[in-house]
Each structure stands twice: as C-alpha cells, then as structure tokens.
Image (tube, rainbow, N blue to C red):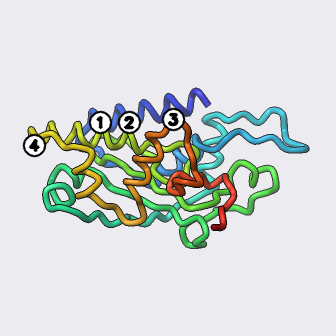
Amino acid sequence: MTRVFFLLMFSGIWISSNAQVSTDAASVFRMQLFVDNKNVTFSGMDPMVVKSDSLYEAFRNAVDLKLDTLKVAGSRELARSVFSSQYQFYRLLAYDKKSIIYKKKLNSSEGQFFMISGNCILAINQRTGLSYRLQGFNGNDFLNFLSDFKEGYKESTGDVLSTKDFLKNYQVEGLDFECLYQGLKQDKIDREKYPCLKRNSEPVWIR
C-alpha cells in the first residue's frame, strides 16, 4: 500500500514538472480505484496476498476502462476560459459492460479484489496531473478541488473567486457541487441527507 501511494505521488510530481507530458485519464482512474478500495478478508483467502504494487500490477493487467468525458457549463469566464480547460472530468459507468472490460475471467479470490461496482467521477488537472475523487469513491476530494481551482484561478487572472461565485457559475454534468460543498462542511457526514456523498460500497436508499 505504501509503495503504491508513493508511486502515485511521484507520478503527480513528475507530470507537474514536465509540461510536455500528457495525463492518461484511464491510468489515473485505475490507480485511484485500486488505492480507494478497502482491504478485504474472506474465507480461504491466501494470507500472503498484500495490497501492494504487485497486486496493483495484477489489477492493471486484468482491467481496462472506457471513460466518459463530462461536459462543463456555466459562465464564459469560468467554464470556457483557458484556465478552466486545465480540468477534465471523467465518469466510469460500472454497470455498462462497455465501460469496464475484464481481460481475463476472474476467479473468486480475484473478484474480491478486482471487481468494480457503482459509478465514479474523477477530476484531473491536465497541467499538474493531480486528481480529485468527486463521486462514488470511499473518499471525496471536492474541498481540495475547490481550493486548488480557486488558487489556480487567482494565479491565472489575478482575481479572487468566491465559493459562492464558483457554485453559481460552474457546472459539470452529473455533479451537484452545492450538495458536495454543504455535505462536506458538516461536522458529521450525513450521506442520506447529502446523497451526492454516497459511496459505491454503501446500500441504495429508497425514499
């Protein structure tokens, strides 16, 4: 687990320092899915299995991803500026057979580690290589995304972007930024009140 974390961190730094290097969204998405997954235990599990770079390599070789690129809308200044185009948003539709391709038939043990469920959305800064989990993952990085977006906007334009203006004037297909912001501000996360924070590992609520 530690080695995978440092691999991800190093990759982000290396991409940031090499402007000519592009970011492979599917590769970043695959890394995030692997790191975000909780460790699992089950009857008959091989005690030698460790969540490590070796297990990640097996996961990478077993799964291909086909991502949707989400549309951005809002004010011209935010949604269609040179700065905002640094951010791309990608969605994985886990229940679409064309989105997740298992390159081999998984046995029961592999299925515990490698099966992907639910829909996820990830934002990637194409300039820095940094990524942000925004929907479906066990963790949510929206507040970090918002902070970095506002900081980048100030560096690019010299103007301060308020949270209120961002929420009013920047929209991404399939995401409710107002819900994410309000839900993550709370002292205690309430995923029933703020369904945008629901994790794929949790049951579906029926209202």
Q: Residue at x 81, y 40 (%)?
A: 41
Q: How far is mark 1 from mark 2, CA to CA?
A: 6 Å
Image quadrant assignment for residue 78 = bottom left
According to the picture, the residue beneath numbered tag 1 turns out to be 16
| Dots 4, 3 in contact, CB < 8 A | no
Q: Nearer the viewer, mark 4 or mark 1?
A: 4
The quadrant of the image that shows the C terminus is bottom right
Q: Is residue 9 above or below residue 199?
A: above
Classify mark 1: helix, strand or loop: helix
Residue 74: % across, % down = 23, 63
- Mark 1 to mark 3: distance in Å? 33 Å
- Pointer 4 local density, CA inside 10 Å: few below 14, some 14–19, many at least 20: few
Label 4 and label 3: CA atoms lie apart by 33 Å
Mark 4 lies on residue: 157
Q: Within 10 angstroms of label 1, few (less than 14), some, or many (20 or more) residues?
A: some
Say whether disc 4 or disc 2 marks the residue closer to the N-terminus: 2
139, 111: nearer the viewer: 139
Which marked residue is nearer to the observer: mark 1 or mark 3? 3
Q: Earlier in the sequence, mark 1 or mark 3?
A: 1
Give, as a three-letter code, the residue at label 1.
Ser
Q: Position of residue 138 (x, y in %)?
A: 58, 45
Q: How many marks?
A: 4
Mark 3 and mark 2 lie on one chain; the one further toward the N terminus is 2
Q: Earlier in the sequence, mark 4 or mark 3?
A: 4
Q: Which residue is mark 3?
A: 187
* Front in this rendered view, residue 64 or 67: 67
Residue named by callout 2: 12
Callout 1 touching callout 2 (CB < 8 Å): yes
Q: Nearer the viewer, residue 22 or 166?
A: 166
Determine whether label 1 and label 3 are within 8 Å by CB.
Answer: no
Asked whether, in this view, residue 107 is left or right of residue 16, the answer is right
**Amino acid type for the residue under numbered disc 4:** Thr
